[in-house]
Image (cartoon, helix red, strand yellow):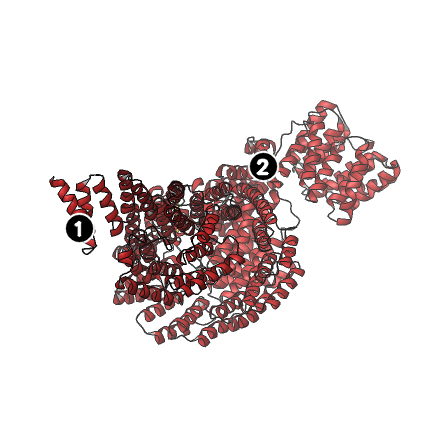
């Protein structure tokens, strides 16, 4: 939301101006109390020009009031017009109500004079002591008020206490006492202040009291309460300008940017020139917050520099102003001018620590390290007296880094900088002074230094990112939350997220924001390209580079542009082009020695040493991949010469080790890596590389872990302990990992990742009771509530469902996370509490809808992850609906899941699973057209998704469109060169061949898939079915038995059947079912093998087994079909019919689809035998409704028509059987030719005969009974 964030920054800037300026023509309301309240406000804010102007106006409106005369004189004194102030005070010194404060002001004035009159001061002191004894209530009150304005609270308190005592609780006295308590800085007094304000307000609205109460709420950081009170002031005193200024401060604190902009809309700098032209402090103060929050915007810095210059011109003896001018020059990159101003400040004040700090900063920038070190040593010695300074610690860190000190030493110093800096912010509400103290520019400097110690490439999946990145993210989030329009901070957050491995969901949003604000932001374009490259999206990466070039042509001078371009070319296999690009990058001006930047017109492109090194390293790798080891070695040597003596030299040593490994010289690689010592940067990377070599090349787990142990010994930290623990887990040694993780947890007890790793390691050791105890102890500590999820998940795995439920219910009291509800639903499902499971999922869905709505406005980065969770919740609800056979509702929720999972159609994603499930539901609803459409879409996206392809083949068979299958098989082959080696491909090909009447070819393909973990079991079952029934006959059927008797009883046929049964029995031994249903399926197949022998004893054994299954599981369709088949083989047709009629009355379901079809066909066979053709016909139509490719149903239908002598209709049905059998079954061919002959379609009859005889030359009868007769009929 760039517009919104722009308003935020605009609000902050405009409000800063207005908070420091106001319109003096604002007394508006008549009456002395309101005027006095305004004057008191100006005095407290040090707007003394305003004090004079407002007092003059009050005198003009309200007459010659001595109180306003006094304010006018006081304003003159504080604006430096001392003589005029004394003159005005002398004119009212005899006015009783202001007598005491006038004497005090005269003493103050004489002391402020260049040549103080000591006698006059003594005389006034004496007079003050005398008059104090007899002073009245008003005189005491204004004396206390004057002392308060001077900052002398304790003395003022004496006078106000007397006022309250004399008056018996005077309202004005109580209000001023409350103000004194509020501004003294003591907590005990601040608590009392609100009581006094409330007492005073009981007598009616008082603007000074309400203003005080507002400030009380502000100190307490109760901004809503403060805003309510300030609105009360505005309602009662609509022309009281300070109330509006306060309101803007509060809107700023509440981050109500739009309201702040609306309130602050005015020409502010002009107001400053008009109203406070000589207020040096105000000019100075206004520059501070702006310069520190503008992101070094040169235009804004010119304005802030002008403000500080005006302040210095008004007060040229002020060292603080000169120091600030030095800092303004640093921000603009003008180091020499900065040094000049810092030296000027030192001349004005030799004790100025900030000026000396500025000089040291300049020396470090200019590389004068020795001088800087001496000055820092001096400041260190006096630091105890001046207090700890974040900037001083930062300079120590910069010096340490420039002197190439140990990484740990520099990081410790940087950590100290942040601790000191943030501790100095305690107690400041979000306002102008907070922005100044926060100094986002300084924090960004610190972050850039941290990033020097972070990996240059993002963490790979499963790898723990550098803890420094987490530290950086925390600081940057604070900066962006406070100054949302600070583009550099948003960019750095994107960079940190990218390096942390949070690529997809996080970095994109930040970079898009940067580029919407400034499309020419080269660094943001380049980082966006790197993000796309990390996601292997070379197309979008190239687009980002082109876009970058179109906005900023000078980016061609940036080595990183060429580096990313080369990496993209390497990804797509264009190695020669990549090498050319990198060679071009090497010759850029920014790559030359001692050059740190290249200047474009109006733009300055930073070129880090690490980026320059990366170009060389990429070139070395490109040469290696291109089979050019010599060129790679030359490029690496050039890089070593170029960067010798720099910290980056060590990266090159590591690359040298990689090159040695590539050349097979492992010992040389290890020697190079051993030379990198703990004091040097990249020591950790070197050790990790060594460990990798020991594990991958030497297969030595002992030396692998020794590298990590050495890391822990040399650089003990939570991060190195974590690396060691991960290493132990990597080599399957969880016990050792647990021990190390526990040590890491002691060093960093609040790290949630560590606690989770310990729990998971305990689970891996199968020490479940200890894991549970650990989780429970961690939860009792109250710091690891997120572990509730891990504990509940473990308890669920251990089937301790009640305990898991209790844990999650407790967690849901304080965790608003849909994942917890989803897990609870899974637990309820395990407990068979289906209604509770669905309720829990519905609650999760409602919660996730709210989370998504908030995330879209508050955390756009988190939206993809939250959408994914929302999709998973909808999918879980859909699964429950499917179980309940509420398919309409299930489809609705799968569609909702797909809405949440909008992805690139060319890329496979979790949404594919939801689309698959939805298509499956369409199949269950027998909406084959829609189901086919969804499966086809999935295959267009990923042609080698064999699970989808196998379902599509089944669907196309049922839809009568098997001819479309080869297209998808060809797509899979073209998509992957490995397709013909994939078990899934062979399974799908086998399925298609089986369905099209090619059992032998089908067997060959299923055989290639039978050893596969995923496809093997189904392939074996299909092979067994083919062995037992290769021609897809109706087992137990009698209709076609007599017709095929001659073939069926041949010795060759019987031997073939016996061989097939033995093959099936051998295949059965390969089946290893893992579920109860799997064991039942195996048992059924075993008994089908028994029945296939046709031996009475075997068939009876099979019948008994099927009966046992039906007794155990009522309405088990395969077992009922098995019983009916056994009865048919045993010639007990009535019993078979009864079981089949029972099946025919059941509702069809897709799981038992094949068994339903076989049952209906067998029952139809029985009815045909009994000449009940109509009843049989209904059953056959039912078969064809569920499977339009059912050859057997068409064959039976043809037989019925043939029996009824409707030869044309019979021929139509036989045609369909012949077509869907792929014209391969000679029996169906014979019947079709016979009915063509009977229907006098002689040519067609002859054509079919030729086709049958071509495939089966010895097929009996067809030549004599049909072919010859058809030819003879044609001749006549």
Q: Is residue 370 above or below residue 325?
A: below
The answer to whether residue 873 is visible is yes
Q: Is residue 595 left or right of residue 900?
A: left
Q: Residue at x 59, y 42 (%)?
A: 285
Q: Residue at x 75, y 23 (%)?
A: 63
Image coordinates for residue 151, horizontal then vertical, percent: 72, 44
Give the labeled residue for mark 1: 1263
Based on the displayed image, in which of its 4 quarters is residue 1056 positioned? bottom left
Is 581 in front, or is 873? 873
Q: Is residue 694 above or below residue 387?
A: below
| Mark 2–mark 1 distance (CA, rounded to whole Å) | 104 Å
Is 179 in front, or is 122? 179
Looking at this rendering, what residue extends furthest in the left direction? 1275
Q: Nearer the viewer, mark 2 or mark 1?
A: 1
Circle nearer the N terminus (2, 1): 2
Q: Which circle marks residue 15 in the picture?
A: 2
- Position of the C terminus, as image quadrant, is top left
Task: Rate crowding at label 2 as few (under 14), some (14 to 19) or many (20 or more) other CA atoms within 10 Å.
Answer: many
The answer to whether residue 328 is visible is no
Based on the displayed image, in which of its 4 quarters is residue 761 positioned? bottom right
Image coordinates for residue 603, horizontal then vertical, percent: 39, 45
Task: Rate crowding at label 1 as few (under 14), some (14 to 19) or many (20 or more) other CA atoms within 10 Å.
Answer: some
Q: Is residue 1054 left or right of residue 39?
A: left
Identify the element where label 2 is drawn: helix
Image coordinates for residue 953, horizontal then vertical, percent: 35, 49
Q: Which circle marks residue 513 in the picture?
A: none
């Amino acid at each position: 939301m760039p517009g919104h964030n722009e308003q935020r920054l605009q609000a902050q800037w405009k409000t800063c101006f207005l908070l420091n300026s106001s319109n003096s023509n604002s007394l508006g309301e008549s009456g002395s109390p309101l005027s006095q309240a305004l004057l008191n406000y100006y005095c407290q804010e040090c707007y003394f020009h305003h004090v004079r102007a407002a007092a003059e106006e009050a005198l003009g409106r309200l007459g010659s009031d001595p109180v306003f005369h006094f304010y006018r004189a006081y304003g003159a004194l504080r604006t430096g017009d001392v003589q005029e102030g004394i003159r005005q005070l002398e004119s009212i010194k005899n006015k009783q109500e202001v007598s005491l404060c006038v004497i005090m002001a005269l003493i103050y004035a004489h002391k402020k004079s260049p040549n103080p009159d000591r006698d006059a001061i003594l005389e006034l002191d004496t007079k003050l002591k005398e008059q104090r004894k007899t002073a009245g209530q008003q005189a005491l009150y204004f004396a206390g008020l004057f002392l308060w304005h001077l900052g002398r609270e304790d003395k003022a308190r004496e006078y106000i206490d007397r006022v309250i005592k004399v008056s018996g609780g005077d309202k004005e006295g109580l209000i001023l006492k409350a103000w004194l308590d509020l501004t003294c800085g003591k907590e005990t007094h601040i608590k009392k202040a609100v009581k006094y304000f409330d007492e005073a307000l009981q007598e009616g609205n008082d603007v000074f009291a309400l203003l005080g109460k507002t400030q009380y709420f502000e100190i307490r950081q109760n901004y809503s309460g403060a805003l309510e009170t300030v609105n009360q002031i505005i309602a009662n005193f609509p022309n009281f300008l300070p109330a509006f200024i306060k309101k803007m401060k509060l809107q700023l604190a509440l981050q109500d940017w739009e309201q702040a902009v609306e309130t602050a809309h005015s020409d502010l700098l002009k107001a400053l020139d008009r109203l406070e032209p000589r207020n040096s402090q105000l000019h100075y103060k206004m520059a501070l917050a702006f310069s520190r929050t503008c992101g070094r915007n040169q235009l804004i810095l010119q304005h802030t520099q002008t403000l500080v210059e005006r302040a210095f011109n008004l007060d040229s003896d002020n060292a603080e102003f000169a120091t600030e001018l030095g800092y303004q020059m640093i921000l603009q990159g003008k180091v020499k001018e900065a040094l000049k101003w810092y030296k000027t400040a030192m001349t004005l004040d030799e004790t100025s620590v900030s000026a000396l700090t500025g000089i040291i900063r300049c020396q470090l920038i200019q590389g004068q390290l020795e001088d800087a070190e001496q000055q820092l040593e001096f400041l260190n010695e006096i630091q105890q007296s001046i207090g700890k300074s974040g900037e001083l610690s930062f300079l120590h860190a910069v010096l340490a880094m420039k002197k190439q000190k140990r990484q740990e030493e520099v990081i410790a110093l940087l950590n100290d900088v942040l601790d000191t800096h943030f501790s100095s912010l305690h107690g400041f509400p979000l306002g102008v002074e907070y922005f100044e103290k926060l100094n986002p520019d300084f924090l960004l400097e610190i972050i850039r230094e941290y990033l020097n110690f972070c990996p240059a490439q993002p963490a790979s999946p499963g790898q723990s990112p550098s803890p420094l990145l987490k530290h950086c993210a925390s600081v940057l989030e604070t900066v962006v939350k406070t100054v949302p329009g600070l583009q550099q901070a948003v960019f750095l957050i994107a960079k940190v997220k990218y390096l942390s491995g949070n690529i997809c969901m996080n970095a994109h949003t930040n970079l898009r924001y940067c580029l919407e604000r400034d499309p020419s932001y080269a660094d943001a374009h380049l980082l966006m390209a790197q993000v796309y490259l990390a996601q292997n999206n070379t197309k979008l990466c190239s687009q980002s580079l082109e876009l970058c070039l179109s906005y900023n042509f000078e980016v061609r001078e940036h080595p990183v542009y060429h580096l990313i371009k080369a990496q993209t070319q390497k990804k797509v296999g264009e190695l020669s082009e990549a090498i050319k690009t990198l060679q071009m990058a090497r010759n850029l001006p920014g790559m030359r020695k001692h050059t740190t930047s290249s200047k474009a017109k109006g733009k300055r492109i930073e070129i880090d040493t690490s980026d320059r090194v990366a170009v060389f390293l990429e070139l070395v790798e490109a040469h290696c991949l291109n089979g050019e080891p010599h060129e790679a070695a030359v490029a690496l040597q050039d890089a070593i010469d170029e960067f010798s003596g720099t910290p980056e030299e060590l990266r090159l040593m590591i690359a040298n080790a990689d090159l040695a490994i590539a050349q097979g010289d492992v010992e040389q690689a290890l020697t190079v890596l051993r030379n990198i010592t703990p004091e040097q940067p990249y020591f950790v990377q070197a050790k990790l590389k060594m460990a990798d070599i020991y594990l991958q090349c030497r297969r030595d787990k002992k030396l692998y872990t020794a590298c990590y142990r050495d890391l822990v010994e040399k650089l003990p930290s939570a991060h190195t302990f974590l690396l060691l623990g991960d290493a132990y887990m990597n080599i399957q040694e969880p016990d050792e990992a647990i021990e190390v993780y526990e040590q890491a947890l002691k060093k960093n007890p609040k790290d949630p990742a560590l606690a989770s790793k310990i729990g998971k390691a305990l689970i891996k050791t199968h020490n479940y009771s200890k894991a549970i105890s650990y989780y429970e102890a961690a939860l009792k500590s109250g710091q690891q509530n997120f572990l509730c999820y891990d504990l509940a998940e473990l308890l669920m795995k251990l089937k301790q469902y009640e305990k898991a439920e209790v844990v999650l219910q407790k967690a849901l009291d304080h965790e608003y996370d849909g994942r917890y509800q989803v897990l609870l639903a899974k637990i309820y499902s395990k407990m068979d509490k289906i209604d509770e499971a669905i309720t829990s999922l519905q609650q999760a869905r409602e919660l996730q809808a709210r989370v998504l709505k908030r995330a879209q406005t508050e955390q756009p980065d988190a939206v993809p992850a939250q959408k994914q969770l929302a999709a998973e919740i909808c999918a879980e609800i859909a699964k429950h609906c499917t179980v309940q056979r509420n398919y309409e509702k299930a489809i609705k929720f799968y569609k909702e899941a797909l809405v949440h999972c909008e992805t690139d159609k060319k890329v496979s994603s979790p949404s594919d699973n939801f689309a698959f499930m939805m298509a499956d539901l369409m199949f269950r609803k027998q909406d084959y057209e829609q189901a086919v459409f969804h499966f086809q879409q999935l295959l267009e996206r990923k042609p080698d998704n064999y699970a989808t392809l196998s379902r599509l083949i089944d669907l196309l068979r049922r839809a009568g469109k098997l001819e479309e299958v080869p297209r998808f098989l060809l797509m899979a082959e073209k998509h992957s060169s490995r397709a013909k080696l994939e078990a899934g491909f062979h399974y799908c090909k086998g399925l298609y061949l089986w369905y099209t009447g090619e059992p032998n070819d089908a067997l060959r393909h299923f055989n290639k898939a039978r050893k596969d973990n995923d496809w093997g079991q189904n392939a074996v079952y299909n092979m067994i079915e083919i062995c037992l029934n290769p021609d897809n006959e109706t087992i137990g059927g009698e209709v076609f038995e007599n017709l095929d008797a001659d073939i069926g009883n041949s010795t060759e046929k019987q031997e073939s059947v016996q061989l097939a049964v033995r093959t099936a029995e051998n295949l059965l031994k390969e089946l290893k079912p893992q579920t109860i249903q799997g064991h039942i399926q195996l048992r059924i197949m075993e008994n089908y093998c028994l029945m296939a022998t046709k031996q009475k004893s075997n068939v009876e054994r099979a019948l008994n087994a099927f009966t046992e299954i039906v007794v155990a599981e009522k309405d088990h369709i395969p077992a009922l079909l098995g019983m009916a088949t056994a009865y048919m083989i045993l010639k007990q047709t009535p019993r078979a019919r009864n079981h089949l009629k029972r099946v025919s009355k059941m509702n069809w379901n897709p799981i038992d689809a094949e068994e339903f079809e076989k049952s209906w066909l067998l029952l139809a066979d029985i009815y045909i035998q009994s000449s009940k053709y109509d009843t049989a016909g209904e059953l056959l139509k039912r078969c064809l409704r569920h499977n339009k490719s059912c050859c057997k149903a068409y064959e039976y239908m043809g037989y019925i028509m043939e029996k009824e002598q409707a030869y044309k209709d019979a021929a139509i049905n036989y045609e369909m059987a012949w077509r869907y059998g792929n014209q391969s079954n000679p029996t169906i061919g014979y019947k079709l030719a016979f009915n063509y002959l009977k229907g006098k379609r002689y040519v067609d009859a002859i054509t079919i005969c030729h086709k049958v005889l071509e495939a089966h030359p010895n097929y009996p009868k067809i030549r004599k009974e049909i072919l010859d007769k058809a030819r003879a009929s044609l001749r006549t």
